[in-house]
Image (cartoon, coloured by chain):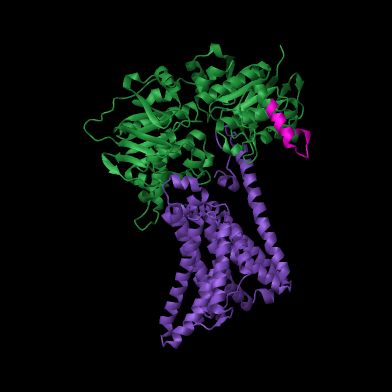
């Protein structure tokens, strides 16, 4: 049997900490291998070692039967190892064709660039994959899904034997994932070995032929995808089996006015005529494809994108919301879609981020900060949300993704909102953190908060939502309530 | 008895140690600047003790620090909100001119010295506040990059000063201002005491108030601050008003010390003030408060300037030294960041692909726009 990649006994430690211990990884040409693991399990270290960014302490790497002696990125690329990192490392100011041609230019040391050559090269790659991309569009103007395709095309412009994709679907919607899957099928036919990293169990099953599970730097399980069940995979990932079936408590909305109700709201050319209510203690899911208007509806209620028509009421009182400050005053909190650029200030301390939306709580009326109160407030928040840190004065960037998301959540919890809107709160978060975050939402609802959860993640919607609303082309298109909320029903509605 | 004594000494020592540790952790950079100041002072004193350590020289340093130190403070605040203020010298001159002009007007109108001083200073502060508000408005509402916005207003404010004075200097200040500019208390010039006072107040504003915290977070990430409900223009305008007022205070010190003002005074101060702000630890990409650092850096640079002057080195050399310091601070800061990152990476396992890269460098933090 020939291997596209054969890594044997890879170990690596940083300082005293072992990141990888005696890891073996084989990739056969034409197979899709999923590298699964929670945050901190050593996936990225393994990818960095194979792609030549880091040198292993021990172990060997063979590509296409030849052992790589010195590890460097150039050597790895020369042998046909390509990695598409999450940020995709594209040049936003260049066209699609120029980006695709870039790797070849770099490899051959081309000094005089030819637009014609770039176009024909890009065209040949695109046709090979059978996809549709505007070669002349600037990368900054195309969708995230298309950028992903551009990154794949760029990798394929060179002779690639093993392609690593780091969470390729994080920012993609369902039908975009579908077209990515077709590209992957095409690559399999070309005998490329594909390794992809993912958190989403669902997608691991849909796309991979084989699974390698890393936990704490050790391969804990490896086998054909068919031999795994969803439960056994989660168990291998986190070491225990978290309960994640539907666990929704009956909400007692009673006679009280709903936490949030919107009547016929709309924003010109984005969405129109949207009416719904979220009761006290209720968790309502809002789902739809990317671009359906679901994020815009959330941002409109939060005042980021003020409404042109309709009314918004919080706790039965109609509120005029023209700005984010208005929304916060009205009692609305919003955990935004992009945690890293919208949710937290990475370079600032955990405690500052936590109190940033509720400064009134930790200062005098003259605007002087009460430092002791600030420290106590943030300490309580850290404990309540189980944020893993020994010092809240450290910057948020010192935390893992799941813990950063808890900081965003804590920041809004501190404002004591009547309504909490969350946009994809568990995207890119490992299974353990995800369970914690969903539990926090259940607790919040139990205490009488109204929760509006925008999500793509069907199991997540099923697990926490009382009701699920669907958005299509800027309008509400149906609802599933209580017992109707189930995975097949949601999926069917989404693709319809 | 003895037991109690030892335990209380031990307690004191522990307390002192923890205080020291706190100080070194939170103020490592400031302590470094302090050490640098000492080294510079010692070196030049060793070269020529009778001149450098003379009372005359020390006093002259204490007289020169406040003007440019205040301007550096102004620029440091602008940098906290990810901006810069190139108009600070122009605003200082405009304010100084007003004070000199009103000193004469007030006297001619028969006002008492105290009254005309108060009016003159209040007017200067209003000029500073208005000029700063204009800067803040142009930056936050008209969305002009701070470096271009304040370049434009610098030209406008300077042009205004030239037009109003026909380019001529104004002479003379009220008696109280003259005393303020030249007198001293306990052997330290009033203007230096004044500088320390302003530093303390501004430091408190930037570190102990909700405005300071909002300004810092807004400087670190405009997008996050908007998602947190902060009014961007509110924060920016207030920050530049503070900047303008401090520039006006620099003008007050200038005119009091020299008893004259002109539209073209102190033009070489601008680059010096920027150098001081950066050496003081301000991050031009925003999100860092470095008020005490700026004050210490002002002292360091004045010590160097005075020392070079003593050993009779030409002014051009001083300029080269300034440039080298500016470039050096950047290199050292970024290298330190990289070094810290490498250490942090070695200490803990590397982050997962989903997590952000470790301790993003100051530049990275601003990237997503």
The part of the chain drawn in magenta is A107-124
Q: Is residue B199 left or right of residue B321?
A: left
Percent of width and height locating residue B209: 42, 56
For chain B, the rendered hue is purple
Q: Is residue B288 above or below residue A281?
A: below
**Quarter-wise, where is residue A276 in the image?**
top left
Quarter of the image where the N terminus of chain B is located: bottom left
Q: Is residue A479 above or below residue B235?
A: above
Percent of width and height locating residue B17: 51, 53
Residue at the spot x=72%, y=36% of the render?
A: A115
Which of the two residues, A24 or B255, is positioned nearer the viewer here? B255
Percent of width and height locating residue A476: 37, 29
Quarter of the image where the C terminus of chain B is located: top right
SS assignment for the magenta stretch, majority: helix
Residue at the spot x=45%, y=45% of the render?
A: A353
Which of the two residues, A446 or A370, is positioned nearer the viewer here? A446
**Quarter-wise, where is residue A273 in the image?**
top left
- Residue B278 appearing in the image: yes
Residue placed furthest toward the left: A255
Q: Is residue A342 left or right of residue A266?
A: right
Q: Is residue B36 magenta?
A: no
Q: Is residue A482 left or right of residue B120?
A: left
- Residue B6 appearing in the image: no
Which of the two residues, B19 or B193, is positioned nearer the viewer here? B193
Percent of width and height locating residue A43: 60, 27
> Which chain can be seen in green?
A
Q: Is residue A139 above or below residue B34?
A: above
Residue at the spot x=48%, y=17% of the render?
A: A230
Which of the two residues, A337 or A47, is positioned nearer the viewer here? A337
**Disc count in the image?**
0
């Amino acid at each position: 049997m020939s291997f596209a990649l054969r890594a044997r006994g890879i170990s690596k430690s940083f300082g005293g900490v072992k990141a990888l211990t005696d890891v073996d990884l084989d990739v056969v040409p034409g197979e899709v291998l999923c590298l699964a693991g929670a945050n901190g399990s050593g996936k990225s270290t393994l990818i960095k070692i194979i792609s030549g960014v880091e040198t292993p302490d021990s172990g060997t790497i063979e590509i296409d039967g030849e052992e790589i002696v010195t590890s460097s990125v150039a050597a790895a690329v020369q042998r046909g190892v390509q990695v598409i990192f999450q940020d995709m490392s594209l040049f936003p100011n260049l066209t699609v064709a120029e980006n695709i041609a870039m790797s070849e230019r770099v490899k051959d040391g081309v000094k005089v660039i030819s637009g014609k050559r770039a176009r024909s090269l890009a065209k040949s790659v695109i046709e090979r994959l059978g996809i549709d991309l505007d070669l002349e569009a600037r990368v900054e103007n195309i969708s995230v899904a298309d950028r992903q395709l551009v990154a794949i095309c760029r990798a394929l412009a060179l002779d690639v034997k093993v392609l690593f994709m780091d969470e390729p679907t994080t920012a993609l919607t369902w039908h975009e994932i579908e077209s990515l899957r077709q590209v992957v099928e095409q690559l399999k036919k070309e005998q490329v070995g594909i390794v992809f990293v993912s958190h989403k169990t669902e997608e691991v099953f849909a796309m991979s032929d084989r699974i390698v599970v890393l936990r704490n730097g050790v391969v804990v399980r490896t086998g054909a995808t068919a031999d795994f069940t969803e439960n056994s995979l989660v168990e291998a990932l986190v070491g225990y089996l978290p309960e994640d079936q539907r666990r929704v408590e009956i909400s007692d909305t009673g006679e009280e006015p709903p936490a949030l109700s919107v009547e016929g709201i709309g924003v010109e050319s984005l969405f129109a005529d949207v009416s719904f209510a979220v009761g006290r203690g209720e968790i309502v899911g809002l789902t739809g494809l990317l671009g359906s208007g679901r994020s815009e509806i959330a941002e409109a209620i939060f005042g980021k994108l003020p409404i042109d028509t309709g009314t918004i009421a919080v706790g039965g009182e109609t509120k005029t919301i023209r700005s984010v400050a208005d929304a916060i005053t009205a009692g609305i909190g919003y955990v935004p879609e992009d945690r890293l650029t919208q949710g937290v200030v990475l370079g600032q301390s955990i405690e500052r981020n936590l109190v940033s939306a509720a400064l009134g709580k930790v200062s005098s009326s003259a605007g002087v900060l009460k430092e002791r109160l600030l420290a106590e407030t943030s300490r309580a928040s850290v404990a309540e949300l189980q944020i893993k840190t020994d010092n809240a004065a450290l910057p948020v960037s010192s935390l893992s993704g799941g813990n950063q998301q808890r900081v965003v959540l804590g920041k809004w919890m501190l404002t004591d909102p009547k309504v909490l809107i969350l946009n994809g709160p568990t995207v890119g978060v490992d299974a353990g953190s995800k369970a914690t975050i969903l539990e926090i939402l259940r607790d919040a609802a139990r205490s009488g908060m109204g929760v509006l959860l925008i999500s793509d993640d069907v199991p997540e919607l099923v697990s926490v939502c009382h009701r699920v609303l669907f958005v299509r082309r800027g309008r509400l298109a149906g609802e599933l309530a209580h017992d109707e909320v189930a995975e097949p029903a949601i999926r069917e509605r989404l693709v319809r | 008895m003895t037991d109690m004594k030892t335990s209380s000494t031990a307690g004191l020592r522990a307390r002192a140690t923890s205080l020291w540790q706190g100080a070194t952790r939170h103020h490592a950079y400031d302590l470094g600047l302090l050490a640098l100041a000492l080294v510079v002072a010692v070196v030049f004193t060793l070269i020529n003790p009778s001149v450098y350590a003379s009372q005359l020289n020390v006093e002259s340093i204490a007289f020169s620090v406040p003007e440019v130190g205040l301007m550096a403070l102004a620029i440091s605040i602008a940098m906290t909100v990810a901006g810069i203020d190139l108009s600070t010298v122009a605003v200082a001159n405009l304010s100084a001119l007003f004070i000199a002009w009103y000193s004469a007007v007030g006297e001619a109108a028969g006002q008492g010295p105290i009254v005309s001083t108060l009016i003159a200073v209040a007017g200067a502060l209003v000029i500073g506040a208005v000029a700063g508000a204009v800067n803040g408005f142009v930056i936050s509402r008209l969305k002009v990059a701070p470096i271009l916005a304040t370049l434009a207003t610098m030209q406008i404010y300077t042009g205004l000063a030239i037009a109003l004075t026909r380019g001529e200097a104004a002479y003379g200040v009220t008696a109280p201002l003259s005393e303020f500019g030249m007198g001293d208390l306990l052997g330290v010039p009033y203007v230096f005491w004044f500088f320390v006072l302003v530093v303390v107040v501004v430091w408190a504003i930037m570190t102990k108030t909700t405005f300071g915290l909002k300004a810092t977070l807004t400087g670190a990430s405009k997008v996050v601050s908007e998602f947190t409900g902060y009014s961007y223009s509110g924060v920016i305008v207030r920050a530049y008003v503070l900047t303008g007022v401090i520039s006006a205070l620099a003008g007050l010190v200038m005119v009091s010390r020299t008893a004259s003002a002109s539209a073209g005074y102190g033009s070489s101060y601008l680059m010096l003030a920027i150098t001081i702000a950066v050496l003081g630890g301000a991050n031009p990409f925003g999100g860092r408060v470095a008020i005490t650092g700026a004050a210490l850096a002002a002292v360091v640079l004045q010590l160097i300037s005075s020392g070079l002057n003593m050993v009779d080195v030409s002014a051009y050399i001083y300029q080269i030294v300034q440039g080298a310091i500016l470039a050096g601070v950047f290199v050292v800061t970024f290298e330190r960041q990289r070094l810290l990152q490498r250490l942090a990476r070695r200490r803990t396992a590397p982050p997962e692909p989903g997590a952000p890269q470790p301790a993003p460098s100051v530049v990275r933090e601003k990237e997503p726009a």
